[in-house]
Image: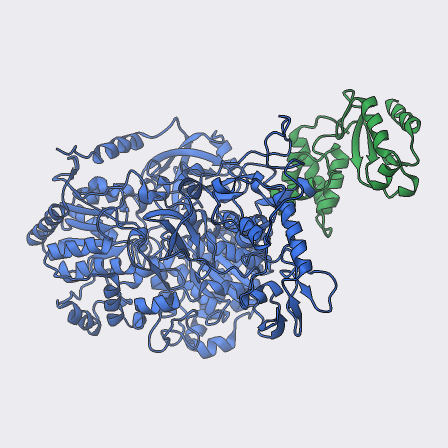
Amino acid sequence: MELQVPEMDVANRTAAIADGHLQDEGPLLPILHDVQRDFGCVPDAALRVIADKLNLSRAEVHGVMSFYHDFRQEPAGRHVLRICRAEACQSVGGEALAEGVRKALGIDWHETTPDGRITLEPVYCLGLCSCAPAAMFDDELHGRLDEAALADIVLEAGR
Amino acid sequence: MSLIKETDYGTPASESENTVTLSIDGFEVTVPEGTSVMRAAMETGIQIPKLCATDMVDAFGSCRLCLVEIEGRRGTPSSCTTPAESGMVVQTQTGRLKDIRRGVMELYISDHPLDCLTCAANGDCELQDMAGAVGLRDVRYGYDGGNHVKQRDGGGEVNARFMPKDESNPYFTYDPSKCIVCSRCVRACEEVQGTFALTIEGRGFGSRVSPGMHESFLNSECVSCGACVQACPTATLQEKSVIEIGQPEHSVVTTCAYCGVGCSFKAEMRGQELVRMVPYKDGKANHGHSCVKGRFAYGYASHKDRILNPMIRERITDPWKEVSWDEALSFAANRLRAIQYEHGKESIGVITSSRCTNEETYLVQKLTRAVFLNNNTDTCARVCHSPTGYGLGQTFGTSAGTQDFDSVEQADVVLVIGANPTDGHPVFASRLKKRLRQGAKLIVVDPRRIDLVRTPHVSAAHHLALRPGTNVAVVTALAHVIVTEGLFDEEFIRTRCDWDEFQEYAEFVADVAHAPETVEALTGVPAAELRAAARLYARGGNGAIYYGLGVTEHSQGSTTVIGIANLAMLTGNIGRPGVGVNPLRGQNNVQGSCDMGSFPHELPGYRHVNNADVRDVFEEVWGVSISDEPGLRIPNMLDAAVEGTFKGLYCQGEDILQSDPDTKHVSAGLAAMDCVIVHDLFLNETSHYAHVFLPGSTFLEKDGTFTNAERRINRVRKVMAPKNGYADWEVTQLLANAMGGGWSYTHPSQIMDEIAATTPSFANVSYQLLEEKGSVQWPCNESTPVGSPVMHVDGFVRGKGRFIRTDYIATDEKTGPRFPLLLTTGRILSQYNVGAQTRRTENVVWHDEDILEIHPHDAETRGVKEGDWVKLVSRSGETSLRASLTDRVSPGVVYTTFHHPTTQANVITTDYSDWATNCPEYKVTAVQVSPSNGPTDWQEQYEEFSVRARRIEAAE
């Protein structure tokens, strides 16, 4: 994952990704996923190429991409911490926990620490209500969190 | 007069022939199967509250206001998305529904500004109406929470959700703070216009309408058709004219004066001020849709350049002098009479306008036939669709498109040849795209990759990118495939055409000389592609052909039209809905001006002047003897002028200097005349050579009729008094009377009565019939009393359809070492014809100069980069303009538009023309392109000359 990719490169690589999905049924979401995997985000230049490849308008592609919070316009930090803010987690202290992490990291929701280490995102239910409060660190789920457990995770991100 | 309010049924009509009967609020109602409960209710007069539903687009079910209760069903389904079923018992107003609706409205209003009194939509706001309808009295949520309305919150902090107004489009504004996210604009853009320029970005409370990728309207994919503005229930998308003026108070239904689609509009007025144009849902050509020109580009009617007083001058080098109507008319009459006295009665003539009404055109040709006593009349159709007249006349028996526009909804394969509908005929293009999205197949034959070849959700099955000038070879090769592969419709040919002629023709096309493989080297079209296209057209179901000036404006224009007619006859694609041969007419009344006898050899109704019976009819009504000699065509008039035998011209609503080919020849002809009368809105380019200028009136200022490309006679209605004092038909009458014509029409309806009395295909047409029916398509006579949507149903007008051989003969305009590229010309969406009207509107933001499209390969070898000035030289002349590099054109082909007089693209075009009709060969000119520093000497001299020629002497 690179932080700065020249626009020409974005176009060429996106075109290659899109070509690989042209025969699929409903290819837009798989393409967006692959693009995000490749660039860490879905750059505007990529959207133009996708629109052209699928014979959609720019507006349509933008509408789909912006509907899903997981598709990012800018690359995230090296790690993404998603803390659940839905009802079950809130009922067992999730909000206070989240507040603590925000203070500790010195950033707000959707922000990345200045060292590019960690990005904080809210999430509305991870399906882990029985183990609330819950969070997701990169692709790994964590349940029954408390301040210490969360601090460990954040610490791990530093490594 | 009052404001016409069209009923909004909420969802589109169902086409089903089966009906269902249900009960709504105790009333029995019977509707076609597939009708929504909402529409069924509206049919009985019960208006269910709604916000996201409107009958121009499919139901969406998002606003949650149109809920109903249905016996035996759980919950409260939305009436727009619920189809009516037999035996259903529906309640539209119950305690439960009232509570839900009020609750929903409270939520809407909690995120909507309360500036109703100063809002531009005040008086025309569906949100306000619905608040009233549901009895909203309070908003329990208050207005302080998260919102999109306030720029700053109570504490002075910036509200990140707030988005400022987008005023980038010249005609309408987008104010996100007033948006209720009903998606009507997004759906109108998709379903009605077919551009897909809008979307809803984000989700939940963050949802907002976004043009393109969160762009401004002007920079987005938006084509400014205004369908979104029309669909918007609030002031979110609002015409700037309404913001400026206020709501209209009365409206008049009239017909657009731009292209040949002939859209019906409501001109919404406040007093004599035009507030806005709104497409009329009952308009048979457009069904409530429009393009940027028709809806918004009417500003030219009140532009400061408009000339409102008659002017004369002794010599064209003199400045103009403003005079009274009497003085101008007697000056003109005396000069014309003097010329005829000295040079003979054949020495003067007229050019009728394809932009004026049928009645006006009829009078202008009558002027030359009954007052000048010659047949020297021609019209700009000479330079566009005269080959259509000849080709379809020879094969089918009459010069007209065979279908109505509704026919496209039943087409399965559409063959577009030499036309660019998304730019030239945008409303038809929207209807075509809708059909293509439903699965119809498209074949495009055009040297340039027009938008239709690939545009969101539409892509052509085949694009035959032929070399300019090889139309006949391609069309004949298509016929070759159909004949040799046995794809023709033998039964149709045996019953409807002359079988012997067919056999002779079949033998001709079956020759290997016409095989796709043989002509490939010539046309540049891959043989396999051409064969596949021919098979698709012949065997793909209903095959419809639409063609434009890319077919006609060639040295073999008439031959191509004949070839197209052959294709339709071969495959039996004629005489029923969904098929046919359809010329797309460039100007609003090209069809009408041809019908009205504008050609020098034809009296109204396409009847030759040497036919004594026909002359008798007119001689009796007009009380004169009509010459049986065909008169001069435009190019012949100019030749004769240069030779000194043609001295006077009355030219109505037509700018031949800019629109006709070989500008230098046109100006030499005009300069040699003693009396050129220009009757126009503006001092156009032709007026530089005029001695008399008679100010014209716009389509808003007169009564009359236009006939569109589907032969539909539409009413044009006067919505304001002529700013120049007289409607154009009155001016022609004044001139005729100044020369002793003795005419006494007091209303255009009397002129139409005279047309009906003399012209069989118009026999039943009257203003009264048009008032009753809205519009009719000719032929409209005893056998078809209310007109003919489809022609040649039971047999061709001429009897048997006639196959004619179509030999390909290359044009004399050839590329060579000095002129290696082929120039072809066309149009762009925002501009119209010579641009006299659209250049005087805000449409210039989209296209403020003509641009030369050139393939990157050709550009590179010439050292031309994007945006560079280039010199364009042909054997006729040279001009310069900016270049744009694009692979829309093939290598070896360059393309430009002819909307701007500073470019004068017609300085370049040659005087080669169609063998049968003299239609100029605009579409093929051999040229060279080279880098340049700016305008050529000729352009600078012309600019200087224009300024001098337009001088008006100060009033004393």
The N terminus of chain A - image quarter? top right
Q: Which of B441 and B330 lies nearest the eye of the viewer?
A: B330
Q: Residue at x 60, y 51 (%)?
A: B457
| Chain corresponding to blue in the figure | B
Of B399 and B815, the residue lying toward us:
B399
Q: Is residue B926 above or below residue B627?
A: above
Percent position (x, y) of residue B372?
14, 58
Which of the 4 image quadrants contains residue B838?
top left
- Name the spot of residue B294 as percent of width and height, x first: 41, 50
Q: Depth check: B434 or B448 in front?
A: B434
- Work out whether B86 lies above or below B810: below
Q: Where the C terminus of chain A falls, by quadrant?
A: top right
Q: Is residue B862 left or right of residue A82?
A: left
Residue at point 40% right, 44% down?
A: B831
In the image: residue B795, left or right of residue B193: left
Side of B726 relative to B270 (left or right): left
Give the vertical position of B222 relative to B633 (above or below): above
Examine the rendering and report whether any part of residue B511 can be seen.
Answer: no
Q: Specify the colour of chain A.
A: green
Q: Residue furthest front?
A: B137
Which color mode does the image show? by chain
Q: Where does residue B840 sit, x and y in percent of width and height?
A: 35, 40
